Image: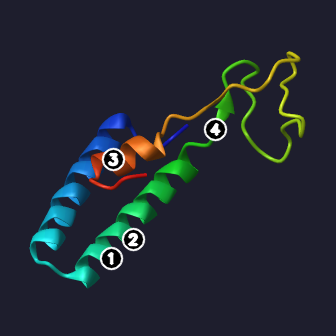
Amino acid sequence: MSRYTKEHYEDVAKALKENRAWAIQMDSAHARGVMASTIGTFADLFAADAPEWCGRCESWKSGYASPEGYCCLGRPHAWKSKFNREQFLAACGLES
């Protein structure tokens, strides 16, 4: 189970977006770069905490998943994750 909730993602995204806006307003390439890196680090952290799982067979995405991409039900895996990286980056003011 994830340590984070949707509210955590939203609160962190809001704080990072505000700091990114400040960095842009300061017109500092270094500050913008630091904020983009920080946002990416949080996205990596949240993604690692919410691994993908198959909505059909409920197996976690790992090296044990079928290499053909099919689950035990004979259908393609339907990978899902609680964390949406693209949505998080957009909420932080970055394009994915």
- Where's residue 42, x and y in %? 41, 59
- Based on the displayed image, in which of its 4 quarters is residue 70 positioned? top right
At x 36%, y 35%, the residue is 6
Callout 2 crowding tier (Cα within 10 Å): few <14, some 14–19, many ≥20 = few
Q: Which residue is mark 3?
A: 90
Spatial distance from mark 1 to mark 4, Cα to Cα? 29 Å
Q: Which amino acid type is marked by label 2?
A: Ser
Circle 3/circle 2 CB separation < 8 Å: no
Circle 1/circle 2 CB separation < 8 Å: yes
Q: Which mark is residue 33?
A: 1
Callout 3 crowding tier (Cα within 10 Å): few <14, some 14–19, many ≥20 = few
Q: Which amino acid type is marked by label 1?
A: Gly
| Number of numbered labels in the structure image | 4
Callout 4 crowding tier (Cα within 10 Å): few <14, some 14–19, many ≥20 = some
Q: Say whether disc 3 or disc 1 marks the residue closer to the N-terminus.
A: 1
Secondary structure beneath disc 2?
helix
Q: Which amino acid type is marked by label 4?
A: Glu
At x 83%, y 33%, the residue is 69
Spatial distance from mark 3 to mark 1, Cα to Cα? 16 Å
Q: Which residue is mark 2?
A: 37
At x 48%, y 40%, the residue is 83
Instruction: Note whether residue 4 is visible.
Output: no
- Where's residue 94, x and y in %? 33, 56
Circle 1/circle 4 CB separation < 8 Å: no
Q: Which mark is residue 22?
A: none
Q: Which residue is mark 4?
A: 52
